[in-house]
Amino acid sequence: MASGEAFFIEPLPGLSGIPPCEETGATFEENACQKALYYGSRCSGWVFAEDSGLEVDALAGEPGIYSARFAGPDATDDANNQLVLNRLLSSDNRRARFVCVIALVRDGSLVRTFRGTVEGEILIAARGGQGFGYDPIFYYPPLGCSFGEISREQKQTVSHRGAALDQLTAFLKLQSV
């Protein structure tokens, strides 16, 4: 693609038949790279994968890379949220952030990573029925509400994934494919 031309994102051919990549990294970056290299080795061209989650300062960065399974291997969003809320009961420090790292590979080789974050606070109780995961307990001060109280479109403009995707698309627009 020439600079400024449109591009399209498509699922990896045969994705449903590929066993899931094991995530054994210690950071979002390691897991994103591991997944992108794993899936990127199965086709030519550009492939990207991401890893993301919630970091809470008072919990020393937890749930972090274990965000999806913080309350156990088959944890529900509600169970994960409740565990975070319970662990913060005696804490005044409720600072937290969502983190997303996207790793981009081309022809099976890592090209670079893109990191997006959004800063906020953990509420005392869940608010709102929008979104998923930790959205109902994540308060975003600039909007004065939780991510569970805003639309998907609104969230995309300020979210960690939106920020990482914006960086990825800006990079790809400058590339010649």
Image (cartoon, rainbow, N blue to C red):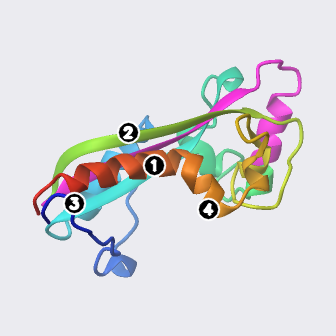
Q: Identify the residue position indicated by label 3 in the image.
A: 4
Q: Is residue 34 visible?
A: no
Displayed quadrant of residue 88: top right
The type of residue carrying mark 2 is Glu
Mark 3 or mark 4, whichever is nearer to me = 3
Displayed quadrant of residue 141: top right
Q: Is residue 102 above or below residue 144?
A: below
Work out how far the residue at label 1 is from the one at label 3, CA to CA, in angstroms: 27 Å
Q: Identify the residue position indicated by label 2 in the image.
A: 29
Mark 2 or mark 4, whichever is nearer to me = 4
The verdict on residue 94 being magenta is yes
Work out how far the residue at label 2 is from the one at label 1, CA to CA, in angstroms: 7 Å
Q: Residues within 10 Å of mark 3 (few under 14, many from 20)?
A: few
The type of residue carrying mark 4 is Glu
Q: Is residue 95 visible?
A: yes
Secondary structure at numbered mark 4: helix
Q: Identify the residue position indicated by label 4 in the image.
A: 153
The mark nearer the N terminus, 4 or 1, is 1
Mark 1 or mark 3, whichever is nearer to me = 3
The type of residue carrying mark 1 is Asp
Q: Identify the residue position indicated by label 1 in the image.
A: 51
Q: Tell me the magenta residue range.
A: 80-107
Tell me the tag on residue 11: none
Work out how far the residue at label 2 is from the one at label 4, CA to CA, in angstroms: 26 Å
Mark 4 or mark 1, whichever is nearer to me = 4
Please state, as top left, top right, bottom left or bottom right, where the N terminus lies in the image.
bottom left
Work out how far the residue at label 3 is from the one at label 2, CA to CA, in angstroms: 28 Å
Front in this rendered view, residue 101 or 77 = 101
Work out how far the residue at label 4 is from the one at label 1, CA to CA, in angstroms: 21 Å
Residue 165 coordinates in the image, percent (x, y): 41, 52
